[in-house]
Amino acid sequence: MKYLVQGWHSYRFLISPDELSRILSEYHLVIFNAHVPADYTKSPLDEYIAAYSRLYDLLLSGEKIIWKRDYPLFLHRGITTDLSNCIYGNFHIYEGEQYKRADFGEPVVGISPAALCLRIDENNKLHCSTSCSYSFYPEGYMGVSLDYPKMIQYPYGDGYEPLRTTETLRSYQDFIMLKDSVKKLTRPFSIKAAGNERRLNIRVSDEVRSRLNDCYLFRQYGVIVK
């Protein structure tokens, strides 16, 4: 991509694979964070949902998610209604095969794994954070995040134009529609541990909420989902 971005709109949630599949069925999924084969156009939804389903099952089974074993399941994808925006360039040879990289005219909505980090300090105070990395804290996997840039700069002359809002871009509407679809299925939730209650910036569907008490992370800290 030739543009620069600053700041992010983020929306974290955990829903069932069937619920996510229904939402994403109206969109195209694309890879934008890695090179792709020269004949690539988009990624199959089934592939993404299969990986999401496996992580979802591990989470709600109470089994510990282990990076060395489970890292192939942590997929990133772009979500778009407009494949014509998803242009690829920078063709190159890698291990004898031709590849290309994303050179999109506008950002696409990203969907990426999200994690929740918990800690109880020496004063028995509960600390919660969703800014931790799932690669360093895979056992804290807690669904996914929709991410879209807040500000953007396009090349202009020898430099870049001033920062401007992304809310005028067509692809921003994808973020709004996706967010609205998730919001209809979900509610925020709170957790209680060590006498502390915290409201999380993660939304969950009713189907998920009823099973979260059994996840590995919450059992480790004696968490009760409210």
Image (cartoon, helix red, strand yellow):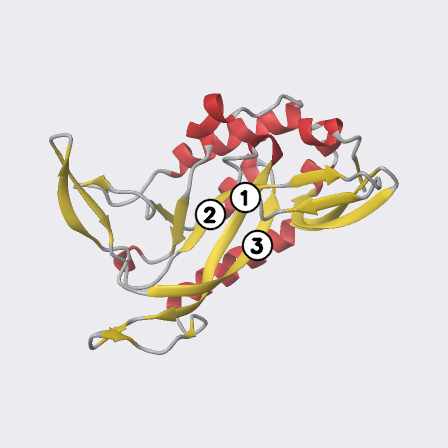
Q: Residue at x 68, y 37 (%)?
A: 208
Q: Earlier in the sequence, mark 1 or mark 2?
A: 2
Q: Residue 141 in the image: state x and y as whole percent.
A: 58, 35
How far apart, in angstroms, are the residues tagged by discs 3 and 1? 8 Å
| Residue designated by label 3 | 11
Q: Residue at x 64, y 54 (%)?
A: 184
Q: Residue 183 in the image: state x and y as whole percent.
A: 62, 55
Q: Is residue 151 above or below residue 201?
A: below
The quadrant the N terminus occupies is bottom left
| Residue designated by label 1 | 144
Q: Secondary structure at mark 3?
A: strand
Residue 8 image label = none
Q: Earlier in the sequence, mark 3 or mark 1?
A: 3
Residue 111 image label = 2
Q: Name the kind of residue labelled 2 in the image.
A: Ile
Q: Name the kind of residue labelled 1 in the image.
A: Val
Asked if residue 142 lies left or right of residue 160, the reply is right
Q: Residue 169 in the image: state x and y as whole percent.
A: 39, 70
